[in-house]
Amino acid sequence: MGVIYKYPINVVDSQMLVMPEGYKIIKADFQNQVLTIWAIVNPVNKLLDVKIRVIETGHTIFCDGELNHIGTVQEYNLVWHVFEEEEI
């Protein structure tokens, strides 16, 4: 069973989201000027901490894990790249 949930996030370098185990992130974009991630989830599954990174074009990436690209978004002539960081 799957349900699409949305997760508003902040435009900051690193943050944690709580998502059900087995989630699949499908999109990142702005909705009503709020950066948002959409994911297919099973809401009855155990909850996990998920590390999300938002990196502006031209900024150095500092991380200890592997980055999985979720999407690139633009607003007000700025471009951000949204990643999920998995621990190695």
Image (cartoon, rainbow, N blue to C red):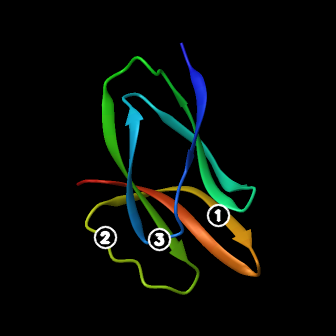
In the image, 47: left or right of 8?
left
Q: Secondary structure at mark 3?
A: loop
In the image, 45: left or right of 54?
left
Q: Residue at x 31, y 24 (%)?
A: 46
Distance of label 2 from label 3 (alpha carbons): 14 Å
In the image, 19: left or right of 3?
left
Which amino acid type is shown beneath numbered disc 3?
A: Val
Q: Residue at x 41, y 28 (%)?
A: 22
Q: Residue at x 68, y 55 (%)?
A: 29
Q: Tell me the quarter of the picture where residue 3 sits.
A: top right
Q: Which residue is mark 2?
A: 63
Distance of label 1 from label 2 (alpha carbons): 18 Å
Upstream in the sequence, badge 2 or badge 3?
A: 3
Q: Which residue is mark 1?
A: 72
Label 1 Cα crowd, 10 Å radius (few <14 / some 14-19 / many 20+): some
Distance of label 1 from label 3 (alpha carbons): 14 Å
Tell me: residue 11, above or below residue 8. below
Tell me: residue 8, above or below residue 13. above
Closer to the eye: label 2 or 3: 3
Upstream in the sequence, badge 1 or badge 3?
A: 3
Q: Which residue is mark 3?
A: 12
Q: Secondary structure at mark 2?
A: loop
Q: Position of residue 2 (x, y in %)?
A: 56, 19
Q: Position of residue 53 (x, y in %)?
A: 44, 64
Tell me: residue 50, above or below residue 11. above
Which amino acid type is shown beneath numbered disc 2?
A: Cys
- Asked if marks 1 and 3 touch (Cβ < 8 Å), the reply is no
Upstream in the sequence, badge 1 or badge 2?
A: 2
